[in-house]
Amino acid sequence: MATTETILFLAHPEPSGLLARASLEGLAVAQATAAALGVPLIAGLFGADVHIATSSIGACGAGRFLAVEAPDFAEPRYATDAAAAEALARAASATVVIAAHTSRLARVLAGVALRLNGRVDTHVNAVDYRSGLAVTRWFYRQRIEGSLRRTQRPWFLLVDPGTALAFSAAPATVELEPVAVSAPSTHTRVTGLHAPSPAEQTIRPEADLLLVAGAGWTRRQKDGQTHTEDAEQLILDFLRLRRASLGSTKSLTDMGGQGQPVLPFLSHLNQVGQTGSTPRHRKGLSTCCHGEEPHVVGWRFIRERRAVNLDPNCGWARGKADVLYVADAFEVMRHLNRLAAAKVEEAVP
Amino acid sequence: MNPLHIVVCGSVVPDPLQTIEPLAGLAGPALKNELLLPAIFDPWAAHALYEAAALAKQCTGSQVWLVSLGPKPKLQQVMMSLAQKGAFTPVFLYGPAHGFADSHATAAVLADAVAAIHGIDRSRLLLFGGWESASRGQGVTLQMIGERLGIFDQFQGVDRFTVRDDGSFEVWERIEGGKHLVSLCSGPPALFGWATGERGEPRNDPQMGMKNMRSVLPALQQAKPASLAADGLQYLDVRLPSQQRATRVVRDQSPEAIAEEIFAWLQDG
């Protein structure tokens, strides 16, 4: 193992010109690692214009601020992003590169690590520096946790969002060191973003609460009928009133492809668990869910969990949720929405 | 458009409904009773295979290869059902497929296997796979295979792939906040790490299964052993997370009372 590390914090600005919260969390990890090991920290940013982003982290204690800046590097695209990241890692002579696990960096850093004959580990949850550098990450979709270290350098670490407190300080002017790199030829052109309208968007990573809807919402109810339209209205009202994010179980999202009654606003992007996401929200409320292990996997990082379910023997009752309410979710949600609406009205002068 | 050469990389993972437990082995961590656990084909890689099969049907003359590294008995078990989902030519490597195997070593042997496929035309190559596995879950192996094969148009978290009349592809990649990044790629070679896609699991086609199995069984017999050196990688600890919570079960409250309690909890903090 190298006796002296040089840590590079790698990031890209968002369209706003600033760094995403996930990147600021990655910076906090890089800062803490450099301080604990007593080694230099270098910041490296790439994009069309990185000045605002660099100033916003000017007080992070980095000894150098490197930049790859050109219009060619504005769009998230493998060939250009990999070239920029490679140039920054080489210019910094970095032995450890710490970055946030954003979709943009996750797309390229393994390739960059290979170019530099280094190694990469993603979805890092913690960096331990008590006896040399080691990282903790999850295996088998959050079902097994492991700590590991590597001797090869450079070692690229992609830190999962939500695992550290974000760096925060007043902007400071810094001297940028430009790193020259010519954009490689590419057959790819970014044409835009596709996002549901704000009114239709049910995925809100910044929300305090995750509501998980299970397949029970589309099943026959006490009267022997399905009430999918009621379910749709209750869930959407709740999301609107609470500004919550919506997750769903695989069985519910799969129904769309099987011609069964579905909640039309759900897509595979809402899915949590084995083949979905593992979101990080402070609170989680599951409704009509009956999954066990795959379901729990999706909730691994939800700190406070409550469930509403008609089945007291559901997997949730066996040590997964803090509170399990054995009740009809339709009725509970109806009352809950009334309370939330009253609260919203109260807040309006 | 010109026929495509589509290579899908993917392997077997324990059925997610099974309880798994790590075990310290001589060569590093492994899963307890790994070979006894029922296996499935890695879910996101399976989506990649379904998409590849559909694309090959759409572009006449296209071919699909499935490159898979895993323990022979598990590969054989999983292929019995996977073979019914779409036409492919199998290429097998015999070796560990558990989540603690090093992704760098895995990428190296898979890249060599792809490069050695007889008759493959790299100028028409589309490399498919899952964007992350359900075992290691790094999301890096496919990327490194692409780098090794000189493919620098790479897409991850792909949910939609449309071939246009001029032979270019429109690609939708998952990004943060429930959005998709939309890109246009002028043509092969390119790499696609699939998320769920938009295609459901195809119905079993027993005839196709029989046809595929005629090449699966010889390919299993001919599978070469792959040695995955974990040089420089050291596991310090591998453990199950503690997940037991002291659940309070509330049975006899009215929906109103429950709603009030949940509302108070949501308001708190």
Image (cartoon, coloured by chain):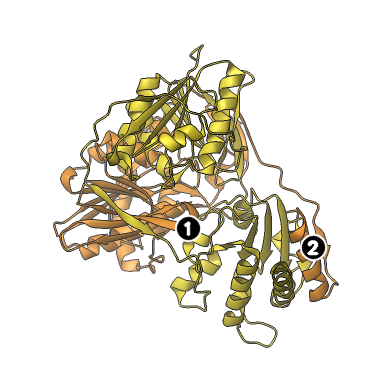
Chain colours: A yellow, B orange
Which residue was labeled with disc 1?
A: B178
Foreground of the two, A168 or B37:
A168
Residue neighbourhood size for the residue with mark 2, other residues' Cα within 10 Å, grouped as few (<14), some (14–19), many (≥20): few
Q: Residue furthest front?
A: A349
State the CA–CA distance, disc 1 to disc 2: 29 Å
Q: Which mark is residue B264?
A: 2
Residue neighbourhood size for the residue with mark 1, other residues' Cα within 10 Å, grouped as few (<14), some (14–19), many (≥20): some
Which chain is indicated by disc 2? B
The total number of labels drawn is: 2
Residue A156's quadrant in the figure? top left
- Asked whether residue A179 is in view, the answer is yes
- In this rendering, which labeled residue sits more in front, label 1 or label 2? 2
- Relative placement, left or right, of A33 versus A308 is left
Which chain is indicated by disc 1? B
Q: Are marks 1 and 2 in contact (CB under 8 Å)?
A: no
Q: Residue at x 59, y 36 (%)?
A: A168
Q: Amino acid at mark 1?
A: Gly
Image coords of residue A59 (percent x, y): 55, 27
- Relative placement, left or right, of A130 versus B160 is right
Question: Reading the chain from its start, which is encountered first: label 1 or label 2?
Answer: 1
Image coords of residue A258 (percent x, y): 46, 74
- Asked whether residue B90 is in view, the answer is no
- Relative placement, left or right, of B26 versus A177 is right
Q: Residue at x 64, y 20 (%)?
A: A130
Q: Amino acid at mark 2?
A: Ala
The quarter of the image holding the N terminus of chain B is: bottom left
Residue at disc 2, secondary structure: helix
Residue at disc 1, secondary structure: helix
- Relative placement, left or right, of A240 versus A256 is right
Q: Residue furthest right?
A: B252
Q: Residue at x 59, y 20 (%)?
A: A35
